[in-house]
Image (spheres, grey):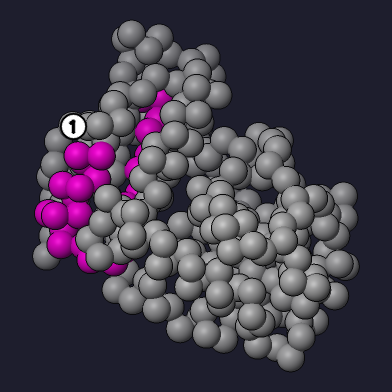
Amino acid sequence: MNRIVYVNGVYLPESEAKVSIFDRGFLMADGVYEVTSVLGGKLIDFDGHAFRLRRSLTELEMASPISKNVLLEVHRELVRLNEIDEGMIYLQITRGAPNDRDFVFPDPQKTPSTIVLFTQNKPGLANNPAAKKGIKVISIEDIRWGRRDIKTVQLLYPSMGKMMAKKAGVDDAWMVQDGFVTEGTSNNAYIVKGNKIITRAKSNDILHGITRAAVLRFAEEAQMEIEERNFSIEEAREADEAFITSASTFVMPVVEIDGVMLGDGSPGNVAPRLREIYIDESRKIAI
């Protein structure tokens, strides 16, 4: 089936989708994005993603080409058109395509924003086999720009980090700045020590994860102890457990860091329980 995508107000086959070579997302990575998961044909955490999208646009002084209500309709229509039961919807908004390349922002009254959405069909998303055995990560230096709280399309270094992990024969990388873990290449990072969940506090240094917020809320409701603070890569290697969260992985146990096995090398008790809670509760409130 030819996937149906959404480009600037029009639904069309992906083979017919086009964006200008002068689009600032292409030339300058001048754009933001969101990824919303779909379970049972319904959207997970849509409100959170819509709120963060608005925040990212505001921080970059970028015009929004679509209202929240219309955005919801577009998400649902793409799910319907592409018959998505489990998967993801990728959304990208850029500052648009002026007539030429220029470092100065174009006048938003003359250059409308570009908006693109497409689906990714991921059967078995909720039953990912990796969650049963856990993943392995390495640590790498975090050399990204200083506004990681804005979900921009500047993903070159995270992509390089993924490749460093692949070359090392592991699944992902955790980025480290001044000795402290910031986050994973495409996820938030956590350790567990004595049943206490430890994760870096929100700041400009990390993405304010929508899944992160939901998981911490569910953990608190389950009366789990949470501490938001910096933790070192050395502390992480000595933790009882570790895990990551993201819209595409939900809660994923980490069983090895830089070749050091955590515990007995299998997922502990906290991460699997949180994954179960997150998926169950998210299904209940999906829209």
Horizontal and vertical percent for residue 126?
38, 72
Please count the marks in the image: 1
Q: Residue 159, located in which quarter of the rendered image?
A: bottom right
- Residue 35: say if magenta: no
Taking 269 as reference, is 211 left or right? left
Q: Is residue 128 left or right of residue 168?
A: left
Q: Is residue 84 magenta?
A: yes
Q: Which of 54 and 179 lies nearest the eye of the viewer?
A: 54
Quadrant location, the N terminus: bottom left
Disc 1 residue crowd, few under 14, some 14–19, many 20+, Cα 10 Å: few
- Where is residue 204? Give x, y as percent: 69, 36
Residue 53 rendering spot, x and y as whole percentages? 44, 34
In the displayed structure, would residue 202 be above or below residue 214?
A: above
Query: What amino acid is found at the position of numbered circle 1 in the picture?
Result: Gly
50 is higher (above) or lower (below) than 240: above
Q: Label 1, on which residue?
A: 9
Quadrant in the picture for residue 11: top left
Q: Is residue 36 left or right of residue 71?
A: right
Q: Residue at x 20, y 54 (%)?
A: 79
Range of magenta residues: 72-97
In this view, 52 is above or below 87: above
270, 176: nearer the viewer: 270
Q: What residue do we see at 65% from left, 88% from top?
A: 266
